[in-house]
Amino acid sequence: MPDYQTHEHDVLVIGAGGAGLRAAIEASAAGAKVGMICKSLLGKAHTVMAEGGIAAALANVDERDNWKVHFADTMRGGQYLNNWRMAELHAKEAPDRVRELEAWGAVFDRTEDGKILQRNFGGHRYPRLAHVGDRTGLEMIRTLQDHGVHQGIDVHMEHTVVTLLKDGDRISGALAYDRDRGRFKVFKAKAVVLATGGVGRAYRITSNSWEYTGDGHALAYAAGAELIDMEFLQFHPTGMVWPPSVQGILVTEGVRGEGGILLNKEGKRFMFGDIPDNYKAQTAKDPEEGWRYCQGDKNANRPPELLTRDHVARCIVREIKEGRGSPHGGVFLDISWIKEKIKDSVAHIQRKLPSMYHQFKQLADIDITQEPMEVGPTTHYVMGGIRVDADTQMSGVPGLFACGECAAGINGANRLGGNSLSDLLVLGKRAGEFAAQYAKEHPAGQVSEEQITVATQVALAPFERGATTGGSAEGPYQIQHDLQNLMQDNVGIVRREDEMQRALDGLAGLWERAGRVAVYGHREYNPGWHTALDLVNLLTVSEAITRSALERTESRGAHFRDDYPDKDAAFGKVNIVTNRQPDGTMQLRREPIPEMPDYLKQIIEEMK
Ligand SMILES: Cc1cc2nc3c(=O)[nH]c(=O)nc-3n(C[C@H](O)[C@H](O)[C@H](O)COP(=O)(O)OP(=O)(O)OC[C@H]3O[C@@H](n4cnc5c(N)ncnc54)[C@H](O)[C@@H]3O)c2cc1C
């Protein structure tokens, strides 16, 4: 029998980013005994990296903004595949969640009359992103954490959950190990909230941190929950491309919101040449109008650099492919040009974009106040994820909830920048509230000794193989590396059937190698072991992305198929749903999106 410690909670939250913290605060406020587990230290979750801001229709900078415009923008950005109920709740509740954050101590940038300042971002009709320079995530995490620690939440840092435990159909807890000592712990819980973030580490070029190995997606899938929309992976248009050691690190959309322009090697502002029909009425007709928009002129339309991320990323790829890219395989992003317009542009840029200024100065020896940056697309955010109920955030597994980036629905085919941080607050709160309610209404489930024994044996198997093969078996790093290359090269921004088929074949080989992976040494401080365990999650999400992308034979939002370059109206009415069959195989089906109620249809019509 394995040796382990046991902890008991009403609600167990897995993940301490914005979504997990907000869920834990709400569950605790409802009287539940709450435990929270995270892979890194508290305060170091991926949310801390968020830069540009939190989208909420506060209407502090433009009084024409309201939840209806935000709802319509989100649905248009998601190409109407969004879960409309989630988009509605999100748009309606985001302003209250931001004001609440302020009441808990978040120090936002201010308008001249002392309100929370809001900035422009791609796809948002009005300036909508509440922000703190370009370090909004840090302020959000700091505030939630400060508030949360006074709620009596038990935090288990540097622990990784490897299996969800079930009693029959319902959830009953989770098995984790502590990353430093390698000891197992069983967490019994009446309700579990997954808030584990995204999947970007399945790709070679990504803005995502080491934590983004798709754990929550894979844990939920293995426990019987469904995944949806996995073909929709967001490639942010602007990541650093040079030097190689920084490739993929994010360059915030805030740069374009402050007036940054995209140029090819010929110095042409290429975005003006490709404006989608459904955005023509909302896009500036010339650079002058675009600049006025960035300066807050309410009569001006947004510059084309602030079109949705899927579109901007594809335009950049086209410039590069057609030989008009920058020397290191990107394009140019220039904010220094604003010296033509603003007297003290150096101080202005340093004040508005402090992190970007230091990032380029320190990592690339580029002074962005004087010269352009080189940028290119980077794997950034997964719109797909665990399928949950819009109001409660409960998955198909009773007692298992999900929120934040690991959950799906709100973004449809493409997420608007800033909508993630507001999603974490709005739907994170809801997940905590309804998980606490579930825990109140249901007694604890049984935790079976057999499940724990099997799960610990599986987790320790790489050591057994290391010991029995005398050092000849393959370690995890090459497998992870090969997976990242396979996905980057075959299931990237522009997709084709033959390449994705190649990816599926490659994945089969990688599954096999992962099944034989060995680790050496012992359980304490062993990153090789952690990586070996990550492989199953990375392979699961990669397979789901590839199969879903093959299934959607059209181009829409973030999913672009070279062999099916147009939209297909039939696909505009379905989500692709992925689930695990009893024999372990992955099954996909197309499921119709429920009809939108008339009052929401009318809003969309009015905002066209
Ligand atoms: C550079 C960058 C800038 C961004 N800027 C913005 C922005 O300005 N506005 C915006 O809206 N969005 C932005 N985003 C996106 C946004 O930051 C993320 O989508 C969001 O922070 C995800 O939050 P989360 O709470 O879902 O997950 P995270 O903050 O990633 O937290 C996940 C948590 O789960 C834990 N975890 C994962 N797996 C396990 C496991 N197996 N066991 C235990 N714990 C586990 C992790 O340790 C972590 O604590 C940005 C993203 C990046 C990369």
Image: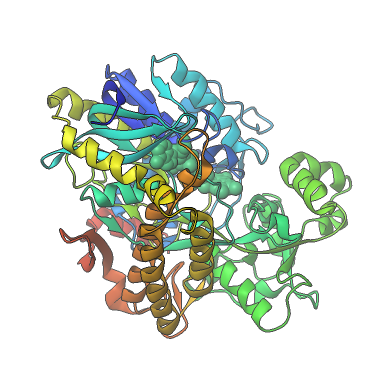
Q: The N terminus lies in which quarter of the figure?
A: top left
Q: Which residue is more in the foreground, 99 or 542?
A: 542
Q: Which of 426 and 492 lies nearest the eye of the viewer?
A: 492
Q: Is residue 142 above or below residue 542?
A: above
Query: Please, which colouring scheme is shown?
Result: rainbow
Q: Can residue 17 be seen in this view?
A: no
* Residue 122, percent from left and from top: 57, 57
Residue 546 appears in the picture as rendered: yes
Q: Which residue occupies the foreground of this view, 469 or 183? A: 469
Q: Which residue is drawn at 56% across and 46% down?
A: 209
Quadrant including the C terminus: bottom left
Tell me the residue at 57%/37% (across/down).
Answer: 48
In the displayed structure, 519 sits above or below 607; it is above
Left or right: residue 277 compared with residue 551? right
In the image: residue 251, left or right of residue 164: right
Q: Please state which of residues 274 and 241 is positioned toward the viewer in this rendering.
A: 241
Q: How many circles with numbers are drawn on the protein?
A: 0
Does 54 sit left or right of 444 as displayed?
right
State left or right for residue 445 relative to residue 236: left
Q: Which residue is drawn at 69% across and 75% down?
A: 270
Q: Where is residue 441 in the image (x, y as percent from the top left)?
A: 13, 25
Coordinates of residue 329 in the picture (x, y in percent)? 71, 72
The residue lying at 73 percent from left, 72 percent from top is: 269
> Is 555 placed above or below 214 here?
below
| Residue 564 image position (x, y, % from top left) | 41, 84
Q: Quadrant of residue 183?
A: top left
